[in-house]
Image (cartoon, helix red, strand yellow):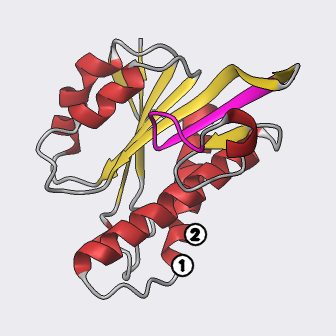
Amino acid sequence: MALSDAPSHELSELHDLVERALRAAQARPTAETTRKERHKARSRHFVLALADALREHEGKDVDILSRYHDDARPRLGTGDLLHDITLSRSVQIGELWYLTEVLWQVESELALDRPDPVHDFNKLVLGSAHHKLFVASMVPEPEALLRTLEPAAARCTGRVFLALIPHPDHWDGNTAGGVRTWQFRR
């Protein structure tokens, strides 16, 4: 498995989606007073914005499964599955709805004090999505993080991506150009 941040149409589109979601999340005001509450609210806003951006990219006929989106709950019986975001298609057979295709599985971990990002990344290995994305906060040595995640990425099916964004503590300033994206390539 090789890492690449070389421009490709797919990686450029993903980069733009993540940047757009970051800008949308930054634009949402937060009334939380403590750093921890503000971080949690900003992370939630980012997940919401990224799910919406992915849906817009994939088309309106997809279901968003996320703890922050409830539109699929009446049909599928749940609002979220294992991942922070799952984009899927479904079909109704009789009275029941079945997942037919999983397009995206997204895990995000924006806390910098998590000792092992592999715990969250491992969830992506479990899924069957065509595309998998792990979003983390920018770290001082991104290459070390990439090397840490590479063994798990090699076990994933589908296309696997990593996006690093500024930590929510830094969203009050200018974050233009602060998003970096890579694709793990076989």
Q: On the image, numbered disc 1 is attached to which residue?
A: 28
Q: Distance between the residues labelled 1 and 2?
A: 7 Å
Confirm whether residue 148 shows in the render: yes
Q: In this view, does 9 lie to the left or right of 31?
A: right
* The quarter of the displayed image where residue 37 is located: bottom left
- In the image, residue 139 sits, relative to residue 102, either above or below, namely below
Q: Residue at x 50, y 84 (%)?
A: 29
Q: How crowded is mark 1: few (under 14 residues within 10 Å), some or many (20 or more)?
A: few
Quarter of the image with the N terminus in it: top left
Q: Which residue is drawn at 59% across and 61% down?
A: 20
Q: In this view of the protein, which residue sits in the foreground, 150 or 119?
A: 119
Amino acid type for the residue under numbered disc 2: Ala
Q: Is mark 2 on a helix, strand or loop?
A: helix
* The furthest residue to the right: 94
User: Residue 146 lies in magenta, yes or no?
Assistant: no
The residue labelled by disc 2 is: 24
Check residue 93 in the rendering and tell me which mark sits there, or answer none.
Answer: none
Q: Can residue 8 be seen in this view?
A: no
Residue at (47% x, 13% y) in the render: 157
Please report the bounds of the magenta region as a residue range. Answer: 79-91
Q: In what element is the residue under mark 1?
A: loop
Q: Do the residues labelled 1 and 2 touch (CB within 8 Å)?
A: yes
Does 42 sit left or right of 24 as displayed? left
Q: Quadrant of the C terminus?
A: top left
Asked if residue 83 is among those painted magenta in the image, a careful observer would answer yes
Q: Residues within 10 Å of mark 2 (few under 14, many from 20)?
A: some
User: For the residue marked with disc 1, what is the amino acid?
Assistant: Arg
Residue 147 placement (x, y as % from top left) = 20, 28
Q: Which residue is drawn at 36% across and 28% down?
A: 123
